[in-house]
Amino acid sequence: MSSTNILGLLGGLALFLYGMQMMSAGLESVAGNKMKSILEKLTSNRFLGIIVGAIITAVIQSSSATTVMVVGFVNSGMMTLNQAVWIIMGANIGTTITGQLIALDVGAIAPLIAFIGVALVMFAKNQRVQYIGEIVAGLGILFVGMNMMSSSMIPLRDYPPFVNLMTRFSNPLIGIIAGMIFTAVIQSSSASVGILQALALSGVISFHDAAFVLFGQNIGTCITAILASIGTERSAKRTTIIHLSFNIIGTILFTVVCLIFPLTDVVAKFSGTSITRQIANMHTLFNITTSVLLIPFGNYLAKFATFVLPEKASEKEHHQHLKYIKSVDTSVDANFGTSAINMENLHNEIERMLNMAKVNVEASFQAFLVGKSTTLADVEKREDYIDYLNKEISRAAAKMMVHETNEKASKNIRSYLDMTTNIERIGDHAVNICDYTKRIEENHIEFSEVSRKEMQQMRQICEKMFEVVNKKPEEDTQKWLDDVHNSENYIDKKTEEFYQNHLDRIQRGECNDEACIIFSEMLTDFERIGDHTWNVAQQMAKIIERGK
């Protein structure tokens, strides 16, 4: 094999992978955000889940990308493990679309397809049309690259070392391992299947041997999701176990069938003489058949993943869930005792939510003063949890209010709803401070020593106000409320003082533009945190007084 053939192979591979990446990026730009939105709103219906998973993967041309999204959603608590099963099944079906596209015999007009796509990207003014141009150009470049690879690999048919290597693939186990390793390295089953099709097209590997490599490629594609699950919650790691289990089961099943039954001959017969079509159809058959067979056992896959990675008691708290409100008794004959239990559970959930907001305010101030955004991941994750609690607590409170007949209890529910809204706003202001930290780090913004001391005071004042709020009023509720109000007034007073000092620094030219803007915004957040905390205390006092 000459150096020209080697360069042609490398160039063809580069164009093939770049064309696939370009097509995938264009497809995701056109519909990616909508696909993510659909995933987030997914119901637990298994058939709908499979269909959605297949469509999304067909659109973004990557089962790995879909699975990584699912890992993220399970990790954040927006999707259950059982829902993830159906999405993964659908993703494995959707990924076969790429192989079917490659099997199209359009090699002769591939340069024209690429030219049309590039022309749309270069000359179209509408952004959506440009994205469509990317898709078309990527498809054309993909075919050009595949033709280059196929042409460059033709001499390999007569190259003894390579022929000896390919004959080893007649051993099913070696073929599966080779496909698994190759796909794990390039982290794309769609790309590895396309390369296998190019290899087969050049005549260096038979369809029968390619089938076993194909089965291994389905296992290898799991590596991307496994890498994405590193550092996530155990529930997200279980998602990768489901993905891996699905493909291992399918590989074992199809390997056994191919060894005892001439399945490859059957597929070749209805696929015609095109070996690329034969491989594409085998890939589709593998994933559809495995999905159909495993649909009745989807929940058992989730249970198996939980068995392999059981949930630890210490980790449960990190999953988004209502800790105290398990269900709301809305029956007509719900008695006073039931209502009291509902109220107590509601109170405990809101207290938990307030504590999260308090931790976020302290952590965001700390990150700001240090000027490092490395600690902000926990703040952002906790903010997502606060938003989740706001939504779920409000939903539970609304159910209680509809069926509550006691006037005091109804007023208490309204107070609790008001508290959740204010706590959620406190969390938002903590996130604002996190955003300032990112700006400081990215733009290397410096603050004067005086302004840094004032920011440190803001942090300490907020901490003291939360301490006052957390002190349970025993007998004298009014005294406790007055203490909270004094804290809020002190925040207002210090806000005015810090702002006046800030204006003086600006007048003396001691403050650069970006630092000035951030400090002013910081003062607003500082003052609003005090306001919302005061609002929470007022509603808390009303509930206590109603209970006397």
Image (cartoon, rainbow, N blue to C red):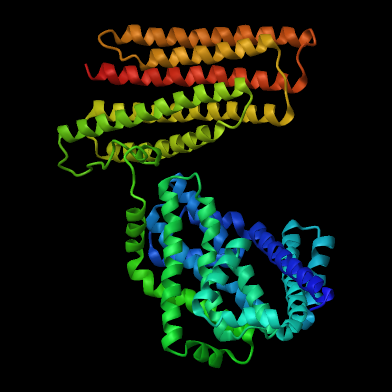
State whether residue 294 appears in this view: yes
Up-down relation of residue 225 to residue 514 (above or below): below
Residue 327: name its quadrant.
top left
User: Could you tell me residue 6's position as x and y percent?
Assistant: 79, 73
- Give the number of callouts: 0
State whether residue 37 appears in this view: no
Between 75 and 304, the one lying in front of the other is 304
Horizontal relation, residue 103 to residue 176: left or right: right
Up-down relation of residue 147 to residue 301 (above or below): below
Q: Residue at x 44, y 51 (%)?
A: 237
Horizontal relation, residue 528 to residue 21: left or right: left
Task: State which quarter of the image contains the C terminus.
Answer: top left
Residue 312: name its quadrant.
top left
Q: Residue at x 44, y 30 (%)?
A: 421
Task: State which quarter of the image contains the N terminus.
Answer: bottom right
Residue 321: name its quadrant.
top left
Between 460 and 133, the one lying in front of the other is 460
Between 263 and 73, the one lying in front of the other is 263
Horizontal relation, residue 187 to residue 418: left or right: right
User: Could you tell me residue 253's position as x and y percent?
Assistant: 41, 77
User: Could you tell me residue 323's position as x and y percent?
Assistant: 31, 37
Q: Residue at x 54, y 10 (%)?
A: 492
